[in-house]
Amino acid sequence: GVGLAGWLRSRKSSMTVHGPNTIVEQTATDIITPEYGPQPMAAVGNNAAEGDDMDVEKADERASDGDDALQGDYTWTIEGFGKMKQAKLYSPVFQSGQYNWRILLFPGGNNVHQLSVYLDVADSATLPQGWSRQAHFTLTVHNQKDPQRSVVKDADHHFTMRACDWGFREFVTLQDLRDPNSGFIVDDKLMVSARVRVEPQVNWWSWDSKKETGYVGLKNQGATCYMNSLLQSLTHIPYFRKAVYHMPTTDGEDPEKSIPLALQRIFYKLQYSDTSVSTKQLTKSFGWDTYDTFMQHDVQELNRVLVDKLEEKMKDTSVAGTMAHLFRGTYTNYVKCINVEDVSLRDEVFYDLQMPVKGCKDLYSSLDEYVKEEILDGDNQYQSENYGKQDARKGVSFKNLPPVLELHLRRFEYDFTTDAMNKINDRFEFPTTLDMDRNDRKYFTQDSDPNIVNKYRLHSVLVHSGGLNGGHYYAFIRPLASEQWFRFDDERVTKVKEKEAVEGQFGGSEHQQHPGHTPQWKLPKISNAYMLVYVRESAIPEINVDASADDIAQHLRRTLEKEQEEKARKKKERQEAHLYTVARVATAADLKQEIGSERFFDLVSHDKVQSLRIKKEHTLLQLKQEIWRLTGAMPSQQRLWLWAKRQNHTYRPDRPLQCDFDDHSPMMDVKEDNTAQASGKFQTELRLYLEVVGPAGPLPPADAPVPDDEGWPMLPNGHLLLFIKFYEPHTEQLSFVGTHVAFQTHTLTDLLPVLRHAKSLPPTTELAVYEEVEFESNVRFEALSEHRTLKDAELQSGDIIVFQALPLPENSVPTAEAEMVLEAPVGAVREAAPAIAATDVFAHEPLLQIPQFFEHVKNRVNVHVHRLPPQQPHGQGVREKDRALEITMDKRWTYDQVTARIGKELKCDPLCLRLTMHNPYSDLPKPTPLKFRGVENLQEMLVSFQKTSDILFYEMLQIPLPELESKKSLKVSWHNSATDEVRVVNLLLDKESTVLDALNALAEEVPTTQDGEAVASGETGAAPMEGVGGSELAVANRQPLRRLRMMEVFNHRIYKIFQEHEEIDTINDLYWTIRAEEMAPEEINAGPDDKLIHVRHFYRDPRMNMTHNFGDPFLLLIRPDDTLASILLRIQAKLSLSDEELAKWKVAVVSFGRVEYLEDDLEVVRPRFRKHDNYGNWDDYLGLEHPQVPGNGRKKNLTRSNFDRPVKIYG
């Protein structure tokens, strides 16, 4: 059979749903069954076996509906059908759409008592691996007596090697087929035909949107499809695009910090670029980071925020008022008294309209609902200023509509029955032409302008595909000057038919079918219209203006044109790369510029070296002539060295190029370096080092004739080229001195005069000389022996010599104070903190020797230190937008040194800093902060999941971190007597503390007023806590004594009241709400027969016959003689309910889900409850049944999903 997942994955079929079914024993009926792999031919006369040469019959081909696909018809006449004994038959091969097909027939049925018919790819075994094709086909078993009774079935299928045949297991019953009167078999002859239409295959990997549609898409940065859809819709409003072009920008502006400039660049590139456009500069100008671009938002909300921001940016410019002109309309809110002459009118402006979807079949019925009058009567009467309470009609009418009407369909609404937001996928129709003047302009006020014809053309449909917590956005747009619809789906733009763009986005349900049967399932379509943009037809000539490059500021046009030219140049280079050799020639000047500033190890960064592009058929001499133009070195002076990667991961000049090639060798013979391609470049490069033998001449003028001298300076045998660096410990500076050709038998003694001369040092200066061996895995420098030859020291061409003068500086010894602070325990650091400002004790110790300097350089890192967002600590919020501190540190620093360095920068006690590591994959802080001295060094702080980061987060604590870690943090929600949360208190207590200690500390945080209510002295968070039995607490200058309790609340139920002696270390305030409150006076003086009961708010789900709690529960003391009426009065006073509200509520005793309503006001309630409760969460409770409306216990804080987080533009 077919699994449900198989049915859902299958493509549409007018009579079938396809699933991965094999031709085996089947128990289900009437299922499409493909046959995996070709089968041997049965012994039928005109059938070809698989793999044999095939005689292909040409089907009757024709163009199908103007599409590119070819359609072919083929009829197979089977003579002597009744005598056939084979289990299956293949028809002759026929062609359709230039593909070979054949019909596969099971005369006795494929494990069913019906004729089974399939369409098969005839040459599937010989087609290339990975082949596929999409086809729509129709199979027909002809009734030769009455063609009207012929059985016709059709299907769509994606044919592949694993699904090379597809069709119908149940076509015609064998009884009907063999009935001589049925007309299917006449003269023992059966006729079966196939019509096949092969859809043109599209290679989306090479899809060129510009070539196919004239438009380009926008790149998705992770979850920015909602923004891409909106930007495409806006840019296709030419008036809007022209206004953005005319927003003032300057040549020196950074597009990552200027929203107008970033938008101008995007709109220009969408108009003139040939490839998809990046939005990174725009999102950075919004102030968004990587986290924001991976957070999906609501396109309607972004539209409002963006329009508001642009309206603000356009103020006092030549395009001020553009947003209002395009999008702003006005409606009038009215209240008309029914029985007296009194009308209240209030005009409001809007930039978009929120249209209801639920219960509305189409846009017109939604508009009717939008302007529907509401009768204000009874308890809801209108308070007239002149006549007091009056029955009235309340409604809204439009005064004027904007030229561009944006309608946001309310597909996301809160469902009270499920206590959650839901997406409404109901069918909602909308027209391509919207007539707002219908029915005598019923949507408008009487004073609206009757001369404006409010007939609108559908311009774009923004679609949301998915559910509440995520999905995908794309847009269908019909440009104002065209009738063609286009689908803009991030980078891909395609042409579509109007039916797909409009009717296909109505939503609703789609049928899932069994072949040959009526539809069995209706599944909601999760892709549907979410935002509609209409343009008034009479305003199209004004809006469809010419917005061209001439509207762009001159400076921006020059910049963009240069970028376009550079892009075209690189594209041409890429296309012609096989014709050219790219030579990167490093010179001594390049090494001198980099070493000591940007580079310390090795010699040069090849990406920063001058490159030459020379045709491969040109000779080495021509390359040397080009080098002469760049350097002035004659071709005969140039010794060109090839670079080589060594086993110790260093990259050095290794061998002169001219040892293997003469001046007349073509460049195509010179082997290029693959290192460049391995680093992501599209073309390999020839990397060279230029050694100039003798003084180089001046740079030649551009028109100077090239010198024709040939040859090159030979390197004598036994000689090697050494590169020399010099280190100055006084200033801790490294510099490149030059190169030296030395003989292998030379010793360090022979080299010393050369080194002294290079730095103009006195002949008697002592030197310390090292060889730079490696640095990648570890820093390794080996001192050269004075009497050992260079050959014995294993030096070779390309090796680097680093030297420094001796003796070492005497005044560079670390001070005692610096050593004390760097090495002292944390307690000492606190005491020494005042001295931090005076001397930079956090600087490294003096780097006196070459290995020491290079070790420091390798471990040096610039760390970006951010404040941890206080409102959502430990990684649940977006990183703050404030500028981070950039501090240079050493990866070998200990925890104490790191906090001391950050503390110095922040001017705070290092002990009061708490650090949190960065997750480089999510670009967020890790959820748990570092413990005091919880890591050995900075290196461990920066490595997360084997990936290195350069970010740390910090918090400034009120007390030292070691002291904080010795305590227990407890988050308590303080509630007043009306069960409202007044504030959240974060208590810091010893881990051995009890609930009584917590209540005592809480009493100091929440002093009482004279009426017994807590004073709200500032919010510090959110969560509750409570304690049983209560605690008598005396607060300074507060009388009389009061009693507090602490409770554990979860899912709108009180699960536990804590005893005073319980230890707080056992309380979990992360998963449970800990609530505290003051006990009511009657509870303190409760008698032995009084009972403390639970009270919860609830509503009933009639479909499931279940109760659901909501809001804040509370405790209530009832006495033996309390009636329902007296209890309701106390609840009314506690919750501040009006009589009207209370009258709508029902009261019930709920026991283990069983609801017993209390309707007699005189009933004594106490007997309804057991004397003793045997269950921890008290399953007997007094229930207050009412709808969820704003208010306490009645209040509902609707949390937004990640999908619906607020959009903010900071730029």
Image (cartoon, rainbow, N blue to C red):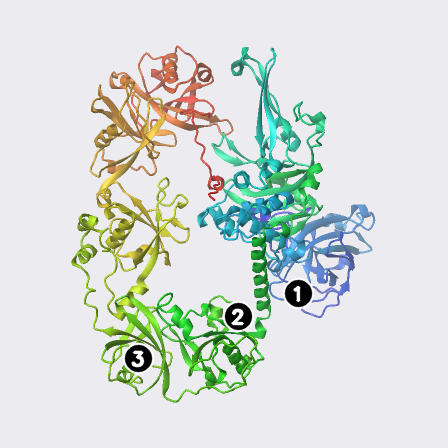
Q: CA distance from mark 2 to mark 1?
A: 51 Å
Would you call the spot at circle 3 few (<14 residues within 10 Å), some (14-19), or many (20 or more)? Answer: few
Q: Position of residue 524 (x, y in %)?
A: 59, 40
Q: Amino acid at mark 3?
A: His
Q: CA distance from mark 3 to mark 2?
A: 42 Å
Of circles 2 and 1, which is in front? 2
| Residue tagged 1 | 40
Identify the mark nearer the N-term, 3 or 1: 1
Secondary structure beneath dot 2 equals loop
| Residue tagged 2 | 683
Identify the mark nearer the N-term, 3 or 2: 2
Q: Amino acid at mark 1?
A: Pro
Secondary structure beneath dot 1 equals loop
User: Marks 1 and 2: in contact by CB < 8 Å?
Assistant: no
Q: Position of residue 182 (x, y in %)?
A: 79, 47
| Residue tagged 3 | 757
Front one among 820 and 189: 820
